[in-house]
Amino acid sequence: MSADGRIFVKGNEAVSMGAIDAGLKGYFGYPITPQNEIPEYMSLHLPKAGGAFVQAESEMAAINMVLGAAATGARAMTSSSSPGVSLMQESFSYMATSETPCVVVNMMRGGPGLGDINTSQGDYYQATRGGGHGDYRTPVLAPSTCQEAYDLTREAFDIAFRFRTPVMILGDAILGQMKEPITRGVPRPADPAESADWGLSGAKGREQRIFRSLFLAEGVLTAVNQRLRAKFEAMASLARCETFMTEDAELVVVSFGSIARIVKSSIRKLRARGLKVGLLRPITLFPFPAEAVAAVARQGKRLLTIEHNMGQMVDDVRLAVCGIADSAFHGTLSGTIPTPDEYEAAIEAALTGGSK
């Protein structure tokens, strides 16, 4: 620990600390690279904080254990990486429909398939479109630093219980494995009243509560989906982003997560050469900060979306500016780790009209 109270930790450890300090009571997970430091940290430190750690027999078992624990009103979570998160999608749909709050961490790796263990942003569609079957959305937070990994994980639990919904922390191998200093906050005290009006705590002396995602009576599912849609629309209040050197920029790059940090390095180099470029970094991927992106377009600035995939967030950027402008795109394929030099060249090409 430094003199100012900061500690030097990996991104995965920062996530774990944020969850424990948010009042986590149950962690259920299954090992997969590159997020294994999360269950490793939880196994040692969560029991000391009064919580329970369970290594499940599979990712599907883990997410259903989360469902069971969360239905009682306990703060519960799991973590995995891309292939493992894919296995959890059915239960995400059940939890969104039964309004069961929890936190899920996805430290993305290369794909499709088992891919590799290096970084990627190939899960954007899966994360922001719900991933499972049916109509539903879940908040998705995309940290870019270890401090954000800590802070946003803490906040994710508050969002989950505010909206009674699963919330995803979407990171990647870079974020999970890099080390940075963070400032840890004061742990959150337990609050049994948080779920007092809906948690499954035994029906003695009150009407029973039932968690379900199956509604067979005529018109019932329609009513449920109308209520859920209103909730998803209310989540728009969560939208936020970071802007960097956008005030006088002629070209604004839209990028998220660890890739946005690489882009920021490229922008600094281009600024040193006198080129007017900036960055808009979505922190919430759902809800997407569409109004902030549209505001940039209305100012007459050109847009370039940079992602570590074949093009996914760029769809949301283009929807945000539909009828106002368009966005160029530069993608790095999974299996390759992008560099500031590559992005510098792509940004300069977009600025001078030679973009893809």
Image: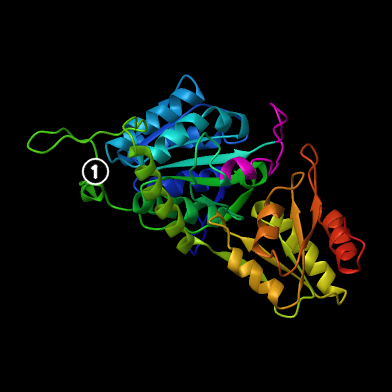
- Mostly what secondary structure, the magenta segment? loop
Report x, y in % for residue 184.
Answer: 45, 56
> Image quadrant for the C terminus?
bottom right
Work out whether residue 39 or residue 142 is closer to the camera in this orientation and state it: 142
Magenta span includes 52: no
Report x, y in % for residue 1.
Answer: 50, 55
Residue 56 appears in the picture as rendered: yes
Report x, y in % for residue 146.
Answer: 57, 53
Residue at the spot 41% in from the left edge and 28% down from the top edge = 64
Work out whether residue 88 or residue 209 is closer to the camera in this orientation and state it: 209
Q: Residue furthest bottom?
A: 248
Residue highlighted by disc 1? 198
The magenta region covers 110-127
- The three-letter code of the residue at mark 1 reads Trp
Q: Within 10 angstroms of label 1, few (less than 14), some, or many (20 or more) residues? A: some
Residue at the spot 9% in from the left edge and 33% down from the top edge = 204
Relative to 183, residue 211 above or below: above
Q: Secondary structure at mark 1?
A: loop
Residue 101 appears in the picture as rendered: no
